Each structure stands twice: as C-alpha cells, then as structure tokens.
Image: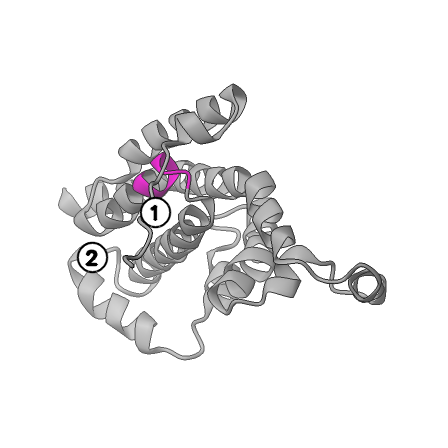
Amino acid sequence: MGRQRIVLRSYEESFEPGKVKVISELIDDLDELGDSFTYKLYTSEIQRCLSAGLLLAAVSVSTSLLELFVRDLSVAQRILLRHGGDMKLKGRVERELEEDRQAGFHTMLEALQPTVTTSEDTASLREFYNQTRIPLAHALVRRLVSPHNQVGDEIDDLLGFSHRSLEDRFEDGAIDEVRFVVQIIKKYRPWLLRRYRTAGG
C-alpha cells in the first residue's frame, strides 16, 4: 500500500479573506527585499511558504533572514567605524564577525544602538529573538505556547499540554511575526544601501 500523498492548498483556499489580503501584501513586500542573491534565496522561500499556507515554515525562514540582516547591518557599521566605510572589505569583516564567538545577536544589537537602530526597535528585536527565534530554532515548544512562569506551568499541569496549542499559536501569530521581520528590514535597509552607495562613489 503506497504512502498517501499530501496535497497542499494555497493560502487563498486555507484562510479567511482578511488573512489572505495580509499574506498577499507580505508576498509583495518580500519582492522588494530580494535585491541580492542571498536575500532572494530567503525571501523567495518565505513567499513559497506563505503561498502554500505553511506558516510555521514561513516564520522559521523569516527568523533566519532577520538574523542575516542584523549581521549585515553590523558588518556595515563595523566597516564604517573601523575601516573608514570601505565596503570592499565586506567579505573579510563578515568572516571576522561570523567567527567572533562574542558577537552574538544581542551583542550586535547593542552595538547597533543608537547610531543605526532605535532603542524601541532594539528592545523589540531582542524580545522577538528570545520569544520566537530561540524557541523555534531549538524546538522549545512549551516556551512558544506557554508563559514561562509558575502560573503557566500550573495551567499546563491542569489542562495538559497539547501540540494543537502550537498550531494555534502559529495560526494566530505567524503573520504578525513575518510582518515584523519585513517591517524591520524595510525600515533599516535604506541605511545599509547608503553605505554601499557612499562606498561606490
């Protein structure tokens, strides 16, 4: 007996009209962000996930894209501060940053504030990383669906933990999380592009 084939439905078939409209807008916004090969690889993957209604996958790839973008901001800032803005050194500085074990996401955020990012956005990015990126990357499902406190633990003990809760969590929140990533990149992308234009002439 053969394995049952999974047929994916499009997001237009899977969600109500309001959510379909938001997803369509996100797919269009992602087109604007894929202006380099590396970004295009991520943005096109997120678009495909959204188009198929695969919200967990869309968030997962979006968190990686956000981390890539924050690293790119950090590389450009380090070049500006230490190398006079010579963006031809991008490859070398990028490798240095990737190999620097002290240069984690939170460290990069601190360095970007306040010359690149606002304190409000830095706080939002830190919260997003702690509450979404880390639990998702390490499959910490309880942290994704339950408040990390004694009350949350007692509710889990009383009602029982259900993996349906994880599905509900992404059904309800995934679009907002992808939108957050898109908005952050759209907001700070002009700063990054200016670094390249200045270096070019």
Q: Secondary structure at mark 2?
A: loop
Determine if the magenta segment contains residue 51.
yes
Colouring mode (rainbow / by chain / secondary structure / one colour): one colour
Q: Specify the segment rendered in magenta.
A: 48-53
Quarter holding the C terminus is top left
Q: Residue furthest front?
A: 1
Determine if the magenta segment contains residue 98.
no
- The crowding category of the residue bearing disc 1, from other C-alpha atoms within 10 Å (few below 14, some 14 to 19, many at least 20), is few
Looking at the image, is 164 positioned above or below residue 95?
A: above
Question: Which of the labelled discs sits on residue 6, or is there none?
Answer: 1
Asked whether residue 119 appears in the rendered view, the answer is no
Q: Residue at x 26, y 48 (%)?
A: 39
Q: In the drawing, does residue 87 fall left or right of residue 182?
A: left
Mark 1: which amino acid?
Ile
Front position among marks 2 and 1:
1
Q: In the drawing, does residue 52 fall left or right of residue 195?
A: right
Q: Which residue is mark 2?
A: 86
